[in-house]
Image (tube, grey):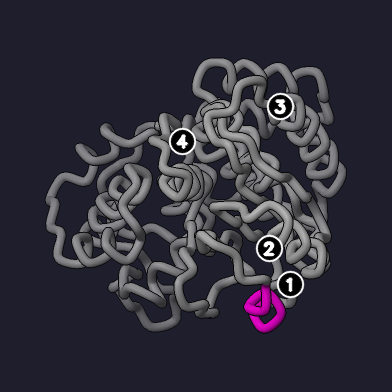
C-alpha cells in the first residue's frame, strides 16, 4: 500500500488537506496525476506552496481551485475555459465542493485493490460489474478503476511488486468493458473513430471510452492498440468520422507530424487527444481531453448529441 494510503480514508483531518501531494490530489478528484501536471503547466493551476527540500504541495486554496475546475470540466466546459474561471476562484470550504462532485469511493477502491493483490479474479470482476451496473462506465472508470490502477502502479514503482496484479486486473477490466461496446440502435449515423496511435499498446482507456459511449447509444469505429497512422487515414478517408479520438500513453507515440497529414474530409472532424503522451504538445484545432468524462462530452458535442454520462 502507498505510504500516502491514509489519504484514501473518507475522513481527512483539516491539516492534511492543507498540504497534499500530486498523487493524493489526483486520487481525491479521480484524475490521473499527469492531468494535474498538465493543468499546472498550461493554465497555472498548480501547487503554490514551496518548502526547501520538499516537493511542492497543494494548499487548501489550490485544492479549492482544482475542485472548481474539475467540476466545470466534467460538466462539459473546455479545460481552457474552466481554467480561466478557476484561476480566480476562491472557496474557503473546499469540502463543500467535494460533496457536489462524483468523488472517489475510497473504501471500494481499497476493496478492489485488496482483491487485485490477492489475485482474486472473481472478486475483482464482481466489484467492477456491480459498480458499472450502478454508476455506468464513465464514473466507474474515473472514480474506481483509475485510482486503483494508479495505486498498483505506485506499488510496482516503489517495490517492484504487483505486476501480476496489474496484468490480471487489466484483463478483467478489458473483458468487462469489451462486452459493453456493441450498440443496437445508435443515435449517430456516422461513427466516431477511436484509436491508440503509433505503437501504443495501452488500450484500456479507449476501451472504457468506447463502452461509455455505447451506454449513450453512440457507435464508434474502435481500432484499438497499435493503430498505424495509415490505417487511421484510411478510415478517415472512407468514413469521414465527425470525431476522432487519439490516445497516447507514451510521448513517443504522440505522432503529431504524421497525424497532421490525415486526409482532408468535409465536414472537418473534431480531433480529440487523450493520454499523458500528449503533454507538452500543441496541435492547432485539437482538443485535449483531461479525462474520460470530458472525452465523452466532447465527442457527444462533435456529433451534435447531448451526453448523459454524468
- Closest to the camera, between mark 3 and mark 4, is 3
Residue 2 among those drawn in magenta = no
Question: Residue 287's x, y, as percent?
Answer: 46, 64
User: Counting other residues with Cα less than 10 Å from the Cα at mark 2, is it few (<14), some (14-19), or many (20 or more)?
Assistant: many
Residue where numbered disc 4 is placed: 104
From what the image shows, is residue 204 above or below residue 285? Answer: above
Q: Are marks 3 and 1 in contact (CB under 8 Å)?
A: no
- Of labels 4 and 2, earlier in sequence is 4
Q: Secondary structure at mark 3?
A: loop
From what the image shows, is residue 86 above or below residue 50? Answer: above
- Front position in the image: 265 or 19: 265
Residue where numbered disc 3 is placed: 182
Residue at image position (63%, 47%) is 151
Question: Residue 272's x, y, as percent?
Answer: 53, 60
Q: Secondary structure at mark 4?
A: loop
- Front position in the image: 29 or 256: 256
Which mark is drawn over residue 253?
Answer: 1
Q: Are marks 2 and 3 in contact (CB under 8 Å)?
A: no
- Of labels 4 and 1, earlier in sequence is 4
Q: CA distance from mark 4 to mark 2?
A: 22 Å
- Of labels 3 and 4, earlier in sequence is 4
Question: Residue 52's x, y, as percent?
Answer: 38, 83
Residue where numbered disc 2 is placed: 249
- Front position in the image: 254 or 145: 254
Quarter holding the N terminus is top right
- Of labels 3 and 1, earlier in sequence is 3
Q: Which residues are magenta?
A: 256-262
Q: CA distance from mark 4 to mark 1?
A: 30 Å
- Front position in the image: 169 or 244: 244
Q: CA distance from mark 2 to mark 3?
A: 25 Å
Residue at image position (53%, 29%) is 187
Amino acid at each position: 500500500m502507498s505510504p500516502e494510503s491514509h489519504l484514501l480514508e473518507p475522513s481527512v483531518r483539516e491539516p492534511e488537506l492543507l498540504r497534499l501531494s500530486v498523487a493524493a490530489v489526483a486520487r481525491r478528484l479521480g484524475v490521473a496525476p499527469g492531468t494535474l501536471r498538465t493543468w499546472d503547466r498550461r493554465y497555472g493551476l498548480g501547487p503554490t506552496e514551496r518548502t526547501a527540500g520538499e516537493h511542492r504541495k497543494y494548499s487548501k486554496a489550490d485544492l479549492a481551485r482544482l475542485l472548481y475546475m474539475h467540476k466545470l470540466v466534467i460538466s462539459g466546459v473546455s479545460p481552457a475555459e474552466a481554467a480561466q474561471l478557476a484561476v480566480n476562484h476562491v472557496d474557503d470550504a473546499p469540502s463543500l465542493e467535494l460533496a457536489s462532485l462524483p468523488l472517489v469511493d475510497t473504501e471500494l477502491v481499497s476493496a478492489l485493490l485488496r482483491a487485485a493483490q490477492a489475485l482474486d479474479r472473481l472478486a475483482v470482476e464482481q466489484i467492477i460489474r456491480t459498480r458499472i451496473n450502478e454508476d455506468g462506465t464513465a464514473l466507474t472508470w474515473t472514480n474506481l478503476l483509475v485510482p486503483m490502477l494508479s495505486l498498483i502502479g505506485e506499488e510496482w514503482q516503489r517495490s517492484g511488486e504487483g505486476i501480476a496484479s496489474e496484468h490480471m486486473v487489466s484483463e478483467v477490466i478489458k473483458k468487462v468493458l469489451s462486452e459493453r461496446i456493441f450498440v443496437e440502435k445508435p443515435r449517430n449515423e456516422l461513427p466516431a473513430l477511436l484509436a491508440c496511435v503509433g505503437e501504443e499498446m495501452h488500450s484500456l482507456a479507449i476501451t472504457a471510452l468506447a463502452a461509455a459511449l455505447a451506454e449513450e447509444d453512440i457507435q464508434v469505429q474502435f481500432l484499438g492498440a497499435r493503430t498505424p497512422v495509415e490505417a487511421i487515414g484510411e478510415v478517415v478517408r472512407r468514413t469521414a468520422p465527425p470525431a476522432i479520438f487519439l490516445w497516447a500513453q507514451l510521448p513517443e507515440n504522440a505522432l503529431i507530424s504524421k497525424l497532421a497529414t490525415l486526409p482532408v474530409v468535409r465536414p472537418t472532424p473534431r480531433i480529440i487527444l487523450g493520454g499523458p503522451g500528449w503533454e507538452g504538445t500543441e496541435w492547432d484545432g485539437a482538443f485535449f481531453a483531461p479525462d474520460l468524462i470530458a472525452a465523452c462530452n466532447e465527442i457527444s458535442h462533435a456529433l451534435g448529441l447531448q451526453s448523459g454520462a454524468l
